[in-house]
Image: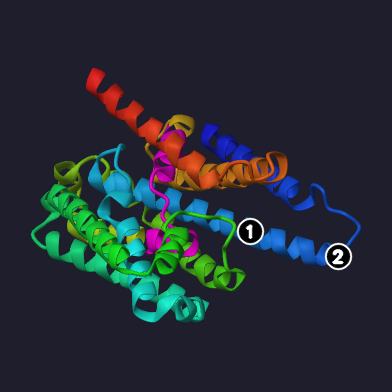
Amino acid sequence: MDRSGWMLAGLVALLAALSALWMLQGLGAGNRGFVLGLRAGKLAALVIVGAAVAVATVLFQTVAANRVLTPSIMGFDALYVLIQTTLVASFGTAAYAGLPAGGKFLSEVAVMTALACLLFGTLLARGGRDVPRMILTGVILGVMFRAMAGFLGRIMDPSEFAVVQSVSFASFNRVNADLLPIAAAVTALAVGLALRMAPRLDVLALGRDAAVSLGLRHQALVLAALALVSALVAVSTALVGPVAFFGLIVAGLAHALARTARHRVLLPAAALIAACLLVGGQWLFERQLGQAATLSVVVEFAGGLFFLYLLLKGRIR
């Protein structure tokens, strides 16, 4: 087994140990089946979100040829907040709370994925050289979505606005267990397709001119990769809420540990690192610190600092 194999095996062992600690620590003599069921549902959500965010970020950075960017720059989080704000403003707090969880989840994923694919397909119609223009358009759309959500928030009832605020930030404590099979299926399919594309992604990372000269169908692969990105980000966002900078941390750690550009190693490494960070972090804040802090807030703060570090490092070089 080479170095990459040992690294992946170590990450799998670490995730297994953290999962066992999460499931078994403090398990009393009461209704163990009920407690284990609750813990298993949250564990599955943490692993699904971690894998989805990590793989989406690595794919997006490969397409954009930039390891500072994350899919959140395309305005996914702003679109999610706009959807929630529109639903609350249209139906009211009581009707919003009574919406079928499965239908609402699938609708959110479908809307975000469809809009992203429409954007990607339209702007990349003339070839992969339009990737920077696509990113800039995503930034502009994100600003527009935030402005629309802010306008609706100003004219709605304060109690309705409080509901919008509660779902506008990522939370790993309010995951609906009924949505996990759907989210797991979509994530597993997308990750499997990404791994199947790994050799071609290695060629894509060489740059457009080099990839085309080697016979790669550049535009088709870029569109396929971005479609997977949109599906993965939509699933993770609809499941727990917007997570902006977490993928940046995970992708950076994956590149540092793997020390290779091969996506067959980078993708599973990033997914395993993300799952370990989320499971270990949630265990720390929930079991050891008594919910004295929120994992999503700490992750976003650390991700922001890491983003600034990457910018300064690039500027110095």
The residue beneath circle 1 is: 42
Q: Position of residue 251 (x, y in %)?
A: 41, 40
Q: Position of residue 206 (x, y in %)?
A: 24, 40
In the image, taking residue 207 as reference, residue 177 lies left or right, namely: right
Number of the label disc, if any, that sits on residue 31? 2
User: Which amino acid does the dot numbered 1 rest on?
Assistant: Lys
**Magenta region:** 231-255
Position of residue 53 relative to residue 100, above or below, is above
Q: Quadrant of residue 114?
A: bottom left
Identify the element where label 1 is drawn.
helix
Q: Residue furthest right?
A: 29
**Magenta span has 129?**
no
Q: Are marks 2 and 1 in contact (CB under 8 Å)?
A: no
Q: Quadrant of the N terminus?
A: top right
Question: Along the polypeptide, which appears first: circle 2 or circle 1?
Answer: 2
Q: Position of residue 227 (x, y in %)?
A: 30, 63
User: Which amino acid does the dot numbered 2 rest on?
Assistant: Asn
Number of the label disc, if any, that sits on residue 311? none
Q: Nearer the viewer, residue 213 or 71?
A: 71
Residue at 23%, 58% in the rendered image: 147
Q: Nearer the viewer, residue 120 or 260?
A: 120
Q: How is the image coloured?
A: rainbow
Residue at 8%, 59% in the rendered image: 126
Q: Quadrant of the C terminus?
A: top left
Q: CA distance from mark 2 to mark 1?
A: 17 Å
Q: Position of residue 256 (x, y in %)?
A: 44, 30
Question: What crowding class fits label 1: few (fewer than 14 Cα within 10 Å), some (14-19), or many (20 or more)?
Answer: many
Residue at 57%, 54% in the rendered image: 47
Q: Nearer the viewer, residue 88 or 143?
A: 88
Q: Nearer the viewer, residue 280 or 147?
A: 147
Position of residue 147 relative to residue 313, above or below, is below
